[in-house]
Image (cartoon, grey):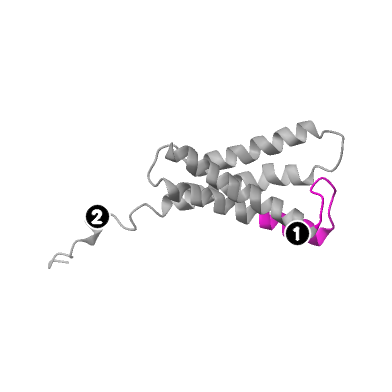
């Protein structure tokens, strides 16, 4: 149950941040933006997707379920579904950037969150060196 909560939390971080961006800026995600806003919004989405994956991993440390990867999968499935549903009806820049960049960023964020649980050194490397050198 905690893994599901972690995945939902990670995805909600991504989804709410995207909704807030488009709400506050007044941009329609289905209309091709100007170059500046397009670059900003993709970088913004990458950051929050990565953060969502990272937080998901940190909620349930050490699990074999890889919640950060699942956050990325949900982002990808949502983008793919939107791409199929909106086929021929408008710009697909947001869906393509979510598939190509944001979903992998969530997985990478999850990997970073998981890696932060690993020991920084091997236990045997913390031993004192022998006097013989």
Residue at the image point whose x is 74% and y is 43% from the top = 96
Q: In which quarter of the image is the N terminus?
A: top left
Q: Does the magenta stretch include residue 67?
A: no
Q: Looking at the picture, how far across and down is residue 5, in whole percent?
A: 49, 41
Query: Where does the image place residue 72, in percent across and percent down from the top left?
Result: 58, 42
SS category of the residue bearing label 1? helix
| Circle 1 residue | 24
Kind of element beneath mark 2: helix
Q: Does residue 82 appear to the left or right of 101 in the view shown? A: right
The C terminus, quarter of image: bottom left
Tell me the residue at 22%/55% (across/down).
124
Residue pushed farthest left? 131
Question: Any mark on residue 123, and which?
Answer: 2
Sequence-first tag of 2 and 1? 1
Q: In this view, does 72 lie above or below 43?
A: above
* Residue 27: x %, y % from top left: 81, 54
* Distance between mark 2 and mark 1 Cα atoms: 50 Å
Say which of 124 and 1 sits in front.
1
Number of numbered tags placed on the structure image: 2
- Asked if residue 43 lies left or right of residue 56, the reply is right
Give the image location of residue 13, x and y in percent: 59, 50
Residue range in magenta is 26-45
Instruction: Assess whether mark 1 and mark 2 are in contact (beta carbons under 8 angstroms).
Output: no
How dense is the environment of label 2, judged by Cα within 10 Å: few (below 14), some, or many (20 and up)?
few
Determine crowd level at label 1: few under 14, some 14-19, many 20+ residues with C-alpha closer than 10 A: few
Q: Choose mark 2 or mark 1, whichever is in front.
A: 1
Residue visible at 82% across and 59% down in the picture:
35
Query: What residue is shown at x 48% (from left), y 44% (from top)?
Result: 6
Q: Nearer the viewer, residue 56 or 128?
A: 56
Q: Is residue 118 left or right of residue 75?
A: left
Check residue 36 for magenta coloring: yes
Report the disc number at residue 35.
none
């Amino acid at each position: 149950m905690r893994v599901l909560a972690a995945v939902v939390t990670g995805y909600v971080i991504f989804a709410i941040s995207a909704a807030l961006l488009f709400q506050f800026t007044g941009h329609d995600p289905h209309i091709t933006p100007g170059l500046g806003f397009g670059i900003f919004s993709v970088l913004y989405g990458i950051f929050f997707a990565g953060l969502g994956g990272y937080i998901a991993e940190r909620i349930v440390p050490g699990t074999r379920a890889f919640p950060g990867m699942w956050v990325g999968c949900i982002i990808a499935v949502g983008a793919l579904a939107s791409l199929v549903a909106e086929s021929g009806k408008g710009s697909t820049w947001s869906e393509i950037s979510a598939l190509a960049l944001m979903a992998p960023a969530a997985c990478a964020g999850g990997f970073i969150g998981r890696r932060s649980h690993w020991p920084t050194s091997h236990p045997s490397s913390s031993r004192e060196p022998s006097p013989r050198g």
